[in-house]
Image: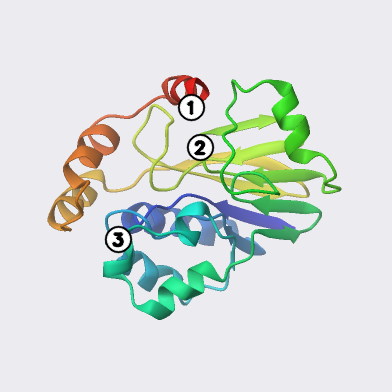
Amino acid sequence: MLVAALYDVHAMPHALEAVLADVERESVDAIVFGGDVFMGPLPAETFALVRSLDAHFVRGNCDREPDEWTLSQLQPDAVEWARSWPATVELDGVLYCHATPRSDMPILTAASPQERFDEAVQGVDARLVVAGHTHMQFRRGRFANAGSVGMPYEGEVAAFWTLVEDGEPTFRRTPFDVERAIAEVERSGWPHAELFVAENLRVAITAEEAAAQFEAQ
């Protein structure tokens, strides 16, 4: 089975459009959205893009508890739909979750100690656990982070996602029209637009920088 794991879109439809074009060329058997789909600059546009897709959805912490901006931009039925997504989805012996199988909040990075990964997969029979939440691609044993479509920490302004085939992940990156995205984010009215453009679209935070910040917490 060939699965496209699309995580942490964070209301960036321009990045998602580009990824979906790549996904279509791959002729995947299934698409899994791994949570945190709508919190970001363009929630309504992102909802319009995903609502008609034949896909599986996993609930992330930002779907469970959206902020006031997201609530103001989405219809109540869209908010309730996201809140109703399951915490995990299992396909072809692979478990998809947002952060860990038991919670959508734990922080795991490539720099995390092994015992935290052992705890994350403890009691899980799946041959692979695919998560997101920390927005960087890596694999540690049976645990893989799919990266982030809309807010990656990879040292490059692009969209990052993962193909999973027969239980094995392949990390992917997709370029998108960054200048168009910047223009529309700046027009969005999102309170964090200026900072997001400066820190995520004009430059790219590296995985090492992000991991150090996360681990310090």
Q: Which residue is mark 2?
A: 134
The quarter of the image holding the N terminus is bottom right
Q: Which residue is mark 1?
A: 214
**Residue at (23% x, 50% y) in the render:** 181
Q: CA distance from mark 1 to mark 3?
A: 24 Å
**Residue at (27% x, 48% y) in the render:** 177
Secondary structure under the numbered disc 2 in the rendered image: loop
Left or right relative to 108: residue 116:
right
Answer with mark 1 or mark 3, whichever residue precedes in sequence.
3
Tag 2 and tag 1, C-beta contact below 8 Å: yes
Instruction: Report x, y in % for residue 169.
Output: 68, 41
Q: In the image, which is nearer the foreground, mark 1 or mark 3?
A: 3
Left or right relative to 199: residue 65:
right
Q: In front here: 88 or 158?
A: 88
Secondary structure under the numbered disc 1 in the rendered image: helix
The amino acid marked with disc number 2 is: Thr
Instruction: Report x, y in % for residue 93.
Output: 81, 54
Tell me the tag on residue 68: 3
Secondary structure under the numbered disc 3 in the rendered image: helix
Q: Quadrant of residue 69?
A: bottom left
